[in-house]
């Protein structure tokens, strides 16, 4: 006799259909009544099965419409040095250029610019003492009107104070265009990135602000940018819902 609870058996059947592609992204699942009839069980059991799939991030429920297979990542991010450099020459930020390459429209909303004391983990990556002044630029990245990620950029205040980075306005081509401008105030060349990734579930405020469905985790990405002298010129602290992106890293081994 099969001792698996009925709701788990229903969830396994639906999960198999989703992962095999029989149910495609955006497809509506059969109604609770239909599934209850098919599986000879109750609507309460079906609800538990769908709740389990929702917690796994496989389905999303819409009030009055039912449950749907969650879409796969909207934007593929190719992360290589040559790709980043090619986008720099286009005059677009890397995020906007990747979106444009895939026929999407990206915008960056500048939420705040301020000088503040560096948090301990940011100070560590910048190679400065805790509470050293830094300039922080807080942004929301949006694709086709949909919020995609938060991104906070930290910059050493003694290097960037008095530049456009410290001003509450957008910078054409992004901050890196200013950093690498041979006639600009910084005149550094970015040569290396180091990324630290941490996967977790979002807190309620994050889930609300980024419209993250139940069961979908986020990735916190700390990216440290180094110049040709191996000095840190930027630390980006990004919060990325895992249902919005597919990342591909290409690592060249000499």
Image (cartoon, rainbow, N blue to C red):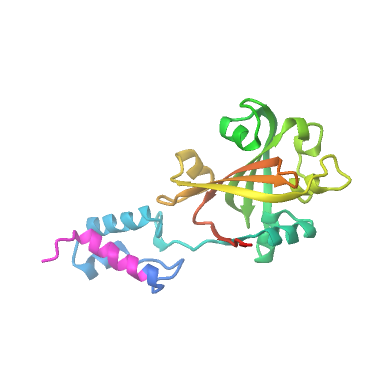
Q: Is residue 36 visible?
A: yes
Q: Is residue 119 above or below residue 146?
A: above
Looking at the rendered image, the quarter that the C terminus falls into is: bottom right
In the rendered picture of this protein, how many numbered marks are placed on residues? 0
Residue at figure coordinates x 70%, y 61% from the top left: 82
Which stretch did the figure color magenta? 1-17
Q: Position of residue 115 (x, y in %)?
A: 70, 29
Residue at figure coordinates x 76%, y 40% from the top left: 169
Q: Is residue 33 visible?
A: no
Q: Is residue 208 above or below residue 12?
A: above
Q: Is residue 222 above or below residue 10?
A: above
Whether residue 246 sits left or right of residue 62 in the image: it is right
Q: Magenta segment: does it hold 178? A: no
Looking at the rendered image, the quarter that the N terminus falls into is: bottom left
Quarter of the image for residue 37 reads bottom left
Q: Position of residue 87 (x, y in %)?
A: 73, 59
């Amino acid at each position: 006799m099969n001792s698996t609870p009925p709701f788990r058996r229903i969830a396994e059947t639906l999960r198999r259909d989703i992962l095999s592609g029989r149910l495609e992204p955006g497809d509506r699942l059969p109604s609770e009544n239909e599934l209850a009839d098919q599986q000879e069980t109750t609507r309460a059991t079906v609800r538990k099965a769908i709740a389990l799939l929702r917690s796994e991030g496989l389905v999303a429920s819409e009030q009055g419409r039912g449950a749907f297979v969650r879409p796969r990542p909207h934007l593929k991010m190719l992360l290589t040095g040559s790709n980043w450099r090619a986008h720099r020459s286009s005059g677009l930020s890397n995020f906007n250029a990747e979106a444009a390459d895939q026929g999407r429209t990206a915008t960056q909303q500048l939420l705040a610019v301020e000088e503040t004391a560096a948090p301990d983990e940011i100070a560590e990556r910048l190679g400065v003492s805790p509470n050293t002044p830094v300039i922080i630029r807080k942004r929301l990245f949006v694709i086709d009107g949909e919020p995609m990620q938060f991104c906070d950029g930290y910059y050493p205040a003694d290097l960037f104070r008095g530049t456009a980075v410290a001003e509450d306005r957008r910078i054409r081509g992004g901050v890196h265009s200013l950093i690498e401008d041979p006639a600009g105030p910084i005149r550094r060349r970015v040569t290396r990135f180091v990324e630290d990734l941490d996967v977790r579930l979002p807190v309620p405020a994050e889930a609300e602000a980024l419209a993250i469905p139940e069961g979908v985790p986020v990735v916190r990405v700390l990216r440290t940018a180094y110049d040709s002298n191996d000095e840190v010129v930027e630390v980006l602290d990004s919060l990325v819902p895992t249902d919005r992106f597919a990342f591909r890293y290409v690592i060249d081994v000499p």
